[in-house]
Amino acid sequence: MRVRGICALLFIALACSRPVASARLTQPAAAAPHGPDLLDPDTWSACYQGFEPNGIPRSDLVRITHACGSLGGMHPLTPIALQYQRADDPSHHYALDVPRSGGCYRVYATGDRHVDDLDLLISDTQGPITGDATRDAWPILPPQGPLCIDAPGRYLLEVSVARGAGYYALQVWGVDRNDLAPPTAGGGADAPRR
């Protein structure tokens, strides 16, 4: 029997105040008539053009995920995590256990007005897969579209304040490509809107 969504331990500590607890997440079945990897790459970055953070992490995160989160049928997979970190503190690490292929993910983070540079990095057992190259306090990873994972296994998200000290908010959005309806041809009523 086919499971209509995947369950995974996703990003330890996103539901709690310390980076040691866990959150269990479920992705629903058909979330959109098109997959996240079918959208034009410009669509993924256009959603945050002109974004101006107000320095309040939770508020900024809600605004940026409102603008970008649901692209490609994505939805929040974790609650918003709020953590404090200084530039000289060790990075915070979150585990992503992916039980099967087909999931696409995007990580959103925003720092408060005392965080000058907040960085994200996703790695697997072979090393880094994608990272944040910006020098700002609101990284989106990956910036040009989601990370679609075709190999089950453990992945690691590293969060670090490179300059400054303060709170950051973090949330993971995603969708399972295996559960999406196929795209429709011809741009009819079911075609994705841009």
Image: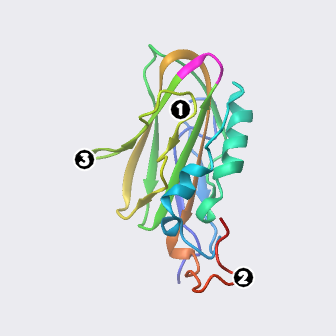
Is 66 situated above or below 82? below
Q: Which quadrant is home to the C terminus?
A: bottom right
Image location (x, y in percent) of residue 73? 62, 65
Q: How is the image coloured?
A: rainbow
Q: Which residue is painted at 44% across and 13% down in the image?
A: 88
Name which residue type carries label 2: Ala
Q: Earlier in the sequence, mark 3 or mark 1?
A: 1
The reply to whether residue 5 is in sight is: yes
Helix, strand, or loop for circle 3?
loop
Pointer 3 with pointer 1, Cβ within 8 A:
no
Name which residue type carries label 3: Gln
Left or right placement of residue 20 versus residue 190 in this view: left
Q: CA distance from mark 3 to mark 1?
A: 23 Å
State the residue position of label 1. 19
State the residue position of label 2. 189
Image location (x, y in percent) of residue 110? 61, 32
Image location (x, y in percent) of residue 89? 46, 16
Q: Is residue 170 magenta?
A: no
Image location (x, y in percent) of residue 19? 53, 32
Q: CA distance from mark 1 to mark 2?
A: 44 Å
For residue 126, which numbered disc appears in the image?
3
Q: Earlier in the sequence, mark 2 or mark 3?
A: 3
Helix, strand, or loop for circle 1?
loop
The magenta segment is: 112-116
For residue 78, which numbered disc appears in the image?
none
Helix, strand, or loop for circle 2?
loop
Q: Earlier in the sequence, mark 1 or mark 2?
A: 1
- Looking at this view, is 111 or 158 the one in front? 111
Of the residues tagged 3 and 1, which is closer to the observer? 3
Name which residue type carries label 1: Pro
Q: CA distance from mark 2 to mark 3?
A: 43 Å
